[in-house]
Every structure is written in structure tokens, then in C-alpha cells.
Image (cartoon, rainbow, N blue to C red):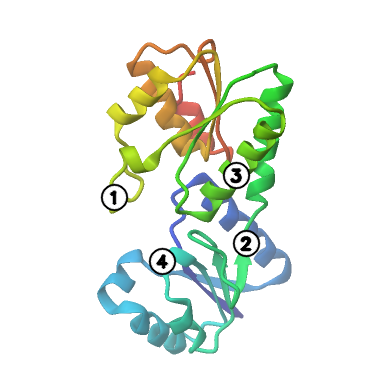
């Protein structure tokens, strides 16, 4: 029986779908058994405590989100590690990653086919998936010679607050965008923020701003109006 330790947060649709894929693979090629370590365990016991527990449990592999673990410390345990990259890709271990740049280009292609001539991107550059999605979107748009408006996170966000959402700052940015506008958000969570800010400011969707997200997070998409 292969023992797999999960050190990641599966609160997002992307992460849950990732876990579904791992479980589906395990059922086909297993048997595997999983242990999802509570996120507070590392906060209480540190990376060394996680390594000691993994050894004591006899873990055969670790699947982790890179932002939540010290890869160097886990490598010392001699246990194979797969990381769901977050801030950056890691060259020392196997990465669960995606074609984020290509995703951004696909989003631009979609809007271009709809006939839009103005484009905006909402996301931050301090995580690889946000940054590369934005870069792909901007590259495709700029290749057509059309304008693109990027959300200036330095002007609006406290860098110490992860996932912070300043409704007033986002509202001001949206109100000052020329209309109609095709807006690509880095994921569905951020797209929902845009939808909520538009509703607060009577900005019509999609008449004035068309919003496109990423990840197909069914729960977030279904509570959005429109």
C-alpha cells in the first residue's frame, strides 16, 4: 500500500480537480492511501516536524503546494516530492504546473474573435500562474497593436496581505477604464471580485465590461450574477 502525504489546501476548484485526478489515478494504479495533514500542523511544529511525522508514518511520497512547505527540508527526508507550484517553479522536484502563458493567449484569442478592441487584465505578478497568464494575454493583445490596461497592484494593494481585495481601488480602476472593455481575470476567484465591483458601481456586464475567468470553479461561477 503506497502512502501519500498531502500538504496542500484544496479549497479552490483548481486544487479540488487536481485532487480528483490524483485519486482517479490511485484507484487505477493503486492501492494508495492518503493522509491530508492539517494546515495548522506545520504552523505548530514547523518543517522539521512535518519531516519527522512523514518518516514516522512511513510516507512513500508527498504532494504539496510549494508556498506551504520547505522543499529543502522535505528533500532531506529522502521522500519523493511533487509540488503544485505557486510562487515559482522549483527545479529540484517534480512540479504540478500548467501552460499559464498559453492560457492567457487563449483568453485574448477568445475576446479578439468576439471583436473587442480594448483589453484589461486583473491579477498580480507575485505568483507564477497569475504572472504568466497575464504575460500571455498581454503578448497576444500587443501583437495586434491594440491597447491593454493592467491593474496596478503597487498602487492599490498591501503586499503583506495575501489575496487582499480593496473594493474601492478596484472600483476606481474599473470606472476609469474605457468602455466597452474585455477584461481577463487570472482565475474565477478574481473574476468574481470584478463582477461584484461592477455591480456595486452599476457597470453593465457584459455591455460595458465583459469578464472572463479561468479554472471552471463551478461553485464560484454559479453564485456569480451574471
Q: Secondary structure at mark 4?
A: helix
Q: Residue at x 45, y 45 (%)?
A: 124
Which quarter of the figure has residue 173? top left
Q: How much space separates mark 3 and mark 1, taking CA atoms?
A: 23 Å
Residue 61 on image: x %, y %: 57, 78
Q: Position of residue 145 (x, y in %)?
A: 68, 27
| Residue occupied by mark 2 | 22
How far separated are the C-alphas under marks 4 and 2?
19 Å
Say few, some or many: other residues with alpha carbon within 10 Å of mark 4 (under 14 / 14 to 19 / 20 or more).
some
Discs 4, 2 touching: Cβ within 8 Å: no
Name the residue beneath numbered marker 3: 135
User: Where's residue 96, x and y in %?
Assistant: 61, 62
| The quadrant where residue 203 appears | top left
Is there a contact, CB below 8 Å, between mark 2 and mark 1?
Answer: no
Query: Residue at image x 54%, y 13%?
Result: 180
State which mark lies toward you, 2 or 1: 1
Amino acid at each position: 500500500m503506497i502512502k501519500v502525504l498531502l500538504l496542500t489546501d484544496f479549497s479552490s476548484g483548481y486544487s479540488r480537480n487536481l485532487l480528483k485526478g490524483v485519486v482517479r489515478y490511485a484507484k487505477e494504479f493503486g492501492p494508495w492511501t492518503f493522509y491530508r495533514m492539517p494546515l495548522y500542523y506545520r504552523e505548530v511544529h514547523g518543517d522539521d516536524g512535518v519531516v519527522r511525522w512523514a518518516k514516522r508514518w512511513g510516507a512513500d511520497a508527498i504532494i504539496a503546494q510549494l508556498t506551504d512547505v520547505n522543499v529543502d527540508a522535505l528533500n532531506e527526508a529522502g521522500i519523493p516530492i511533487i509540488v503544485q507550484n505557486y510562487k515559482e517553479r522549483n527545479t529540484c522536484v517534480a512540479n504540478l504546473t500548467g501552460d499559464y502563458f498559453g492560457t492567457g493567449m487563449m483568453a485574448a484569442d477568445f475576446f479578439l474573435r468576439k471583436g473587442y478592441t480594448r483589453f484589461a487584465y486583473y491579477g498580480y505578478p507575485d505568483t507564477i500562474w497569475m504572472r504568466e497568464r497575464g504575460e500571455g494575454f498581454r503578448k497576444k493583445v500587443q501583437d495586434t497593436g491594440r491597447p491593454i490596461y493592467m491593474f496596478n497592484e503597487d498602487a492599490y494593494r498591501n503586499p503583506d496581505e495575501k489575496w487582499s481585495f480593496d473594493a474601492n481601488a478596484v472600483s476606481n480602476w474599473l470606472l476609469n477604464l474605457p468602455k466597452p472593455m474585455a477584461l481577463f481575470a487570472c482565475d474565477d476567484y478574481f473574476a468574481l471580485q470584478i463582477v461584484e465591483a461592477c455591480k456595486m458601481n452599476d457597470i453593465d456586464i457584459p455591455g460595458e465590461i465583459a469578464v472572463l475567468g479561468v479554472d471552471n470553479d463551478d461553485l464560484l461561477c454559479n453564485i456569480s450574477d451574471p
